[in-house]
Amino acid sequence: MHYKLKKSRGIKRRGRCSRRHRGGRISRRMRMKGGLGPNDSVNIGLQGTYSFANPAAVQQAFKMFTCGTPLQYDAWEKLLVACHNRGLPVYILTSGNKVGIIRTLQLMGLDAAFVEVLCTNAELSVNPMNASGQHNFQGQPKYQVIAQIMTERGLNCQGPPIGYLLDDNGFFTARKLTQDNGVPPDVANLVVTALRSAGIVDRFGVVNPQTTIDIVRTVLASSPASQFAGTIADIMFYQDRTGQMKMRQRNSDHAGLCPSIQFVDVLSNQQTPPDYNLPALLANPFYQLNVSQLGLNRIDGDEAQFNFTPIVIIEHTIQLVNAGRVQILFLDFDQTFQIWEGAIPFEHPLLGRFAAAGAAIKVA
């Protein structure tokens, strides 16, 4: 039982694309409107707004690092503008680093395009408690969060489709093993490497649906992580009320809580943008900084974890928004809006590294 996904580096370089979507830029009026509110700032103890000291010199490179290519970024921007023009609320809904995502959106100049960054991460260092007592979603399934937001906005969760959650359905990666289950990073890497080699999980953390708990135990028993075979099996599976072993939840598993928000798996139709340019991305100063100092796996290495949301999915969503068939939108961040797994933490001790790389960040 083996299955592997080809990395994007196998796509032939087609040259740089000079296209820019001139009509879809985030308007100055949108930027002045405000964007992320107190639940993304003072209520979680986050002070100030990040911006580049010299945005004309580095912001475009940061956008290309985040989204991967000009066409990919332009597609996302066009979607955000379409939502803004129709007064349609857009949320980031993530299990990742809320603080890092907020800072990333600020540096991209896109924070005004989102109502809020909703986060289910149980780790308070990356998802601080909200002092207002509201929107503390630590440890909750994403669709439980969606159901609450829908109630707050007076929207019907049980009616016909009125919105989407664009997300990846992976859940079993080394980062998540460490982050959510406390598995030491070196052990998590050994476990995921063994499971990938056996075709049990792909590089996005999506588990082969034919996998059973006995298969997992057998594969790990003969791996360098053999002593953790039982622990990992218990993380991946659980016993339901009938006594059967079931695979643990994915992002779509609680969609029945709010069927009016349809789940769109951005890994289901993998497509690399036609302007994907590996040499350009390797030369990107933010990519180089993240690989050399912040622990990002190389995009041309065996452990690379990245994904381009197919532009056809983004464009289809734009069509539905413009046709008035969407009333609310939820976007995942890691490997959905951003191509990488994991947002830059942007802790204050790290800011000096950005300044040394010629991308000084100021806090206003």
Image (cartoon, rainbow, N blue to C red):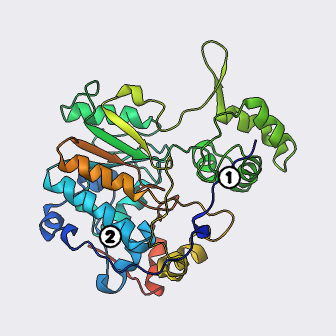
Residue displayed at 36% across by 40% down: 136
Residue 187: horizontal and vertical position, in percent?
74, 51
The residue depicted at 49 percent of the width and 63 percent of the height is 272
Say above or below: 60 vs 358: above
The residue identified by callout 1 is 4
Side (left or right) of 219 relative to 155: right
Depth check: 303 or 231 in front? 303
Q: Which mark is residue 108?
A: 2
Q: Is residue 11 above or below residue 270?
A: below
Among all residues in the image, which is located at the extreme right?
Answer: 222
Q: In the image, what residue occupies the spot 44% across and 56% down?
A: 309
Mark 2 neighbour class, 10 Å CA radius: few under 14, some 14 to 19, many 20 or more: some
* Mark sitting earlier along the chain (1/2): 1
- Give the residue type that dot 2 points to: Met
Label 1 crowding class (10 Å Cα cut-off): few <14, some 14-19, many 20+?
few
Image location (x, y in percent) of residue 261: 32, 35
Q: Does any portion of residue 110 appear in the rendered image? A: yes
Specify the farthest residue to the left.
Answer: 29
